[in-house]
Each structure stands twice: as C-alpha cells, then as structure tokens.
C-alpha cells in the first residue's frame, strides 16, 4: 500500500459500512464568533468519540441551507447539527425523511419531532432588562435579532415582561428590529438616538450589535456608560476586549456545542430514542458598559 501510495476510498468504505464517522454542522454566519465557540464544543466532543466534523455556512439563507443539507447527505454523514438559517423547516423535513439523525442547536424549529439543544433566551431578556432597571434606567431601547427567529421573540418577550413587572409601559418606538450584525446594531442605535425622547440604555440582543451601538453612540459624543448604558447578549470572547468591556448575557456556547454533539451521537447509536430537549441557562456578566442613569 505504501509503495503504491494507496489511499483507501473513505466514501466507498462508508457506503460498505453504512457509517462515515463524519458529522455535518451548518451555522448561519461563520464570521460571527458566537458560532465559532459553539463549533469548538461540537468538534472537541465529536473528535473524542471518533467523528470528524464538516462545517458549512448557510449565511442565513434558506436556499443555501438546503444545498448544504443535500451535500451532507451525499457525503454520507452519520448525522447533522443545525443552527437554522430561518424559521422554515422545509430543508430539514427532507433530511428527516431520510431518517438522518439531526439535532437542532441554538435556534429552535417548533413543531418538529427532533432533538433540541437550546439556551434560555427568555430568561436572558429578563435579566438584561432587570440589570438596567436596577440602574434606574426607565427609557430602555431594545435592538432585536431577525424577527423570524424564535429566539429573537423570546429575548424581546423577556424585555417586555421585565418592564411590565417594574410597572413601566412598553414603548414600541424603543424596539428596533435588526440582524445580529455590528452594522445593524450601529444603524438601529442611530434610529433610537433620533427619537424625541432617546433611551438612556440599550439592550442589544447580541454582542455584535451592542458593539455597533456603542460605536454609533461614541460618534455622537456620548460616553458609555456615563451617558448611555449598553448591554449585549452571547458573551463572545471579544466582549471582554470591547471599549468599554461589554456587560452582557452569557450563553454557555462551548457547553451548548458539547451537549448538542452528545445528543447527536446518542441518537446515532439509538435512533429510536424519544426526542429530547436540553435547555441551558443564560447568566449575567457585568463589566463596564452599564452604569446608573443620570438623566
Ligand atoms: O450572535 C448570533 C446570535 O444568533 C446569537 O445570539 C445566537 O443565539 C445565534 O442564534
């Protein structure tokens, strides 16, 4: 074999054995550090169990997500870990019809009989907003993620509940829809600053948008947190090095990836398991981008 430089054909071997020891993972934005930290948990856990991981980027596009699902099936992967591109499960139904093991990670797809590894987004929205309320902020802006994602609605629902429980009205003008990207957070913050009664604090539903919002505030001469408090969501590694270091709601990214990979491997070993749902807690990380309201 060495003399001939013979390399066994992995695809032929997987067809023969009906196992490729390969897992497919699809994320909606591989440029967002959040997904890199989830992928790390998935890859470490899978590799330790003898699986390699193929990472695909749907770029938040359902058509591209379907193309990757088809590709992974052609590659004979043994299972798929999916962070959904949107709210539609059409591409996934095709995958399920082929009885391919699947775990939905981070972004839920309601109504599917599948395994889910999620974090508590509603709780995260509540603790982010309560943190700002404790600093006496009463005009709190909320920059949301894409409206079609269940986790965007859950975070906003937590924001609404915290305001209501504090006896404060929910002003729809203070809720601006965005896209989980830094530029989106920058533009959404600019819109909030144009209001007749601008917010004294902003809850951005992910760290990239929070960093964009801080940039927009500094450009207008505001000081964070002296004249504007900003809290994010995710606790990506960069949040620690933002200027100022970002107060945020931490998602247990590595643990979420680890849990998802463990659920998938268990599913591949026992396809008849009843669908399971793992919900991991979100927690408050206080740094230096939030402070008492002086307005
Ligand atoms: O930062 C990207 C966002 O989308 C995160 O909040 C995560 O939950 C992902 O779904």
Image (cartoon, rainbow, N blue to C red):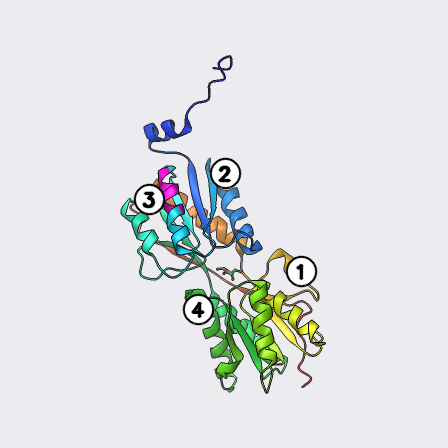
Q: Is residue 249 visible?
A: no
Label 3 environment density (alpha carbons within 10 Å; few <14, some 14–19, many ≥20): some
Question: Looking at the picture, how far across and down is residue 36, in whole percent?
Answer: 55, 50
Label number found at residue 240? 1
Left or right position of 133 against 89: right
Q: What is the CA distance from the residue labelled 2 to the residue labelled 3?
A: 20 Å
Foreground residue, 270 or 207? 207
Q: Image point 62% across, 66% down: which residue?
A: 212
Magenta segment: 68-74
Q: Secondary structure at mark 4?
A: loop
Left or right position of 294 against 120: right
For mark 3, what is the residue?
A: 100
Label 1 environment density (alpha carbons within 10 Å; few <14, some 14–19, many ≥20): some
Q: Image point 53% across, 68% down: which residue?
A: 205
Q: What is the CA distance from the residue labelled 3 to the residue labelled 4?
A: 29 Å
| For the residues bearing labels 3 and 4, Cβ distance under 8 angstroms | no
Label 2 environment density (alpha carbons within 10 Å; few <14, some 14–19, many ≥20): some
Q: What is the CA distance from the residue labelled 1 to the residue labelled 2?
A: 29 Å
Q: Secondary structure at mark 2?
A: helix
For mark 2, what is the residue?
A: 47
Q: Secondary structure at mark 1?
A: helix
Q: Nearer the viewer, mark 3 or mark 4?
A: 4
């Amino acid at each position: 074999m060495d003399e001939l430089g013979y390399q066994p054909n992995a695809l032929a071997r997987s067809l023969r054995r009906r196992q490729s020891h390969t897992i497919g993972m699809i994320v909606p934005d591989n440029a967002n550090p959040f997904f890199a930290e989830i992928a790390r948990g998935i890859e470490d856990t899978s590799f330790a169990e003898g699986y390699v991981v193929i990472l695909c980027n749907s770029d938040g596009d359902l058509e591209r997500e379907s193309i990757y699902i088809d590709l992974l099936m052609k590659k004979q992967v043994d299972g798929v870990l999916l962070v959904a591109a949107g709210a539609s499960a059409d591409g996934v139904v095709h995958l399920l019809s082929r009885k391919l093991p699947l775990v939905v990670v981070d972004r839920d797809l309601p109504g599917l009989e599948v395994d889910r590894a999620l974090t508590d987004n509603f709780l995260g929205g509540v603790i982010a907003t309560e943190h700002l309320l404790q600093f006496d902020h009463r005009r709190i802006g909320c920059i949301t993620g894409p409206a079609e994602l269940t986790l965007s609605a859950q975070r906003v629902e937590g924001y609404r509940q915290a305001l209501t429980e504090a006896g404060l009205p929910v002003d729809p003008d203070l809720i601006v829809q965005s896209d989980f990207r830094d530029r989106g957070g920058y533009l959404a913050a600019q819109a909030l600053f144009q209001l007749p009664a601008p917010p004294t604090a902003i809850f951005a539903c992910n760290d990239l948008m929070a960093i964009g919002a801080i940039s927009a505030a500094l450009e207008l001469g505001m000081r964070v947190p002296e004249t504007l408090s900003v809290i994010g969501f995710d606790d990506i590694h960069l949040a620690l090095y933002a200027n100022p270091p970002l107060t945020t709601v931490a998602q247990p990214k590595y643990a979420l990836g680890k849990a998802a990979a463990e659920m998938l491997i268990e599913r591949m070993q026992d396809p008849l398991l009843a669908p399971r749902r793992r919900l991991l807690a979100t927690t408050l990380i206080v740094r230096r981008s939030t402070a008492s309201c002086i307005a």
